[in-house]
Amino acid sequence: MNNMTLRAISGIIYIAVLCFGILIHVNVSFGLFLALALIAFSEFTKNGKTTLNLSTNLFSYLSVVLLFVGINGGFIGLNPMINKLCLFASFFSITGVFLFELFKHFEKGAANIVFQLGGLIYTALPFCFALPFAHLNGSYQGMVLISLFILIWSSDTFAYLCGKTFGKHKLFEKISPKKTWEGFIGGAILTIGTGIVLFYTTNITSLNNWILFALLAVIFGSIGDLIESMFKRSIGIKDSGNIIPGHGGILDRMDSFMVALPVIYAFFAIFGL
């Protein structure tokens, strides 16, 4: 099996699992995004351990679980008291990160703590906003999350095609040499077109909101992609992992989503979806 065939098959399976998990039921979506948060954090910490010689401890993984359950437990019917206890316990687990490094790795403790908490914020916390975003209209709407993925995938695809066809001016050459302004602008225009199509094929929000939705997905999705590229270049790796054959790791596939989701959720939580 050649690389293109492998990439196509694994890509289809990845998209199918993602869409099925989001659309079938809120409980499945809960498990899916918790798993993604843990895998993303694991990839981040593994790369830091192998390239920067920085260590992690189980308290940081426990913090991922407690924060996620504390924020999202109510959406799957958990008792509100359990949610509060998980959030409360997450502060103790984060404190445990500090205490473990204090007594175990004093010499590199500060670097390890910053590394673990940075990973928690960058890789795990964004996934905690997936279910709140899907509940912005009150009840669970998996199509809201699917729409964000569609807009991000559209932005990536159209930017690549426009850049390959018309690209001349580099967007951020030091970080991503192949990205161009022509690709970014062309991708943005065509992704707005995708948002308009979604307006007519779904019943989620207004046309103006779809245009804003698409613009935010393009801008902050591109920033997320550049941030992950920066991390990988700074530590000298090509892919964050190998869980998706031909595509790399979860961080490679979710980098745009991880930055775009919190911003888009915050915007529409304030101004309404």
Image (cartoon, rainbow, N blue to C red):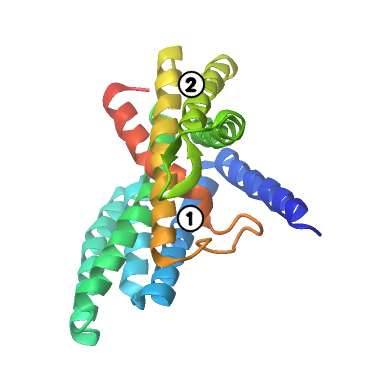
Q: Which residue is mark 1?
A: 251
Question: Looking at the rendered structure, which numbered label has been put on residue 204?
Answer: 2
Q: Nearer the viewer, residue 57 or 242?
A: 242
Residue 102: percent from the left, percent from the top?
18, 81
State the residue at coordinates (39%, 58%): 231
State the residue at coordinates (38%, 41%): 223
Closer to the camera: disc 2 or disc 1?
1
Q: Is residue 11 visible?
A: yes
Is label 2 in contact with label 1 (beta carbons under 8 Å)?
no
Task: Identify the mark nearer the N-term, 2 or 1.
Answer: 2
| Mark 1, other Cα within 10 Å: few <14 / some 14–19 / many ≥20 | many
> Where 122 sits versus 139, above or below?
below
> Where 46 sits versus 273, above or below?
below
For the residue marked with disc 2, what is the amino acid?
Answer: Ile
Q: Nearer the viewer, residue 55 or 77?
A: 55
Q: Nearer the viewer, residue 102 or 168?
A: 168
| Mark 2, other Cα within 10 Å: few <14 / some 14–19 / many ≥20 | some
Quarter location, residue 273: top left
Secondary structure under tag 1 reads helix
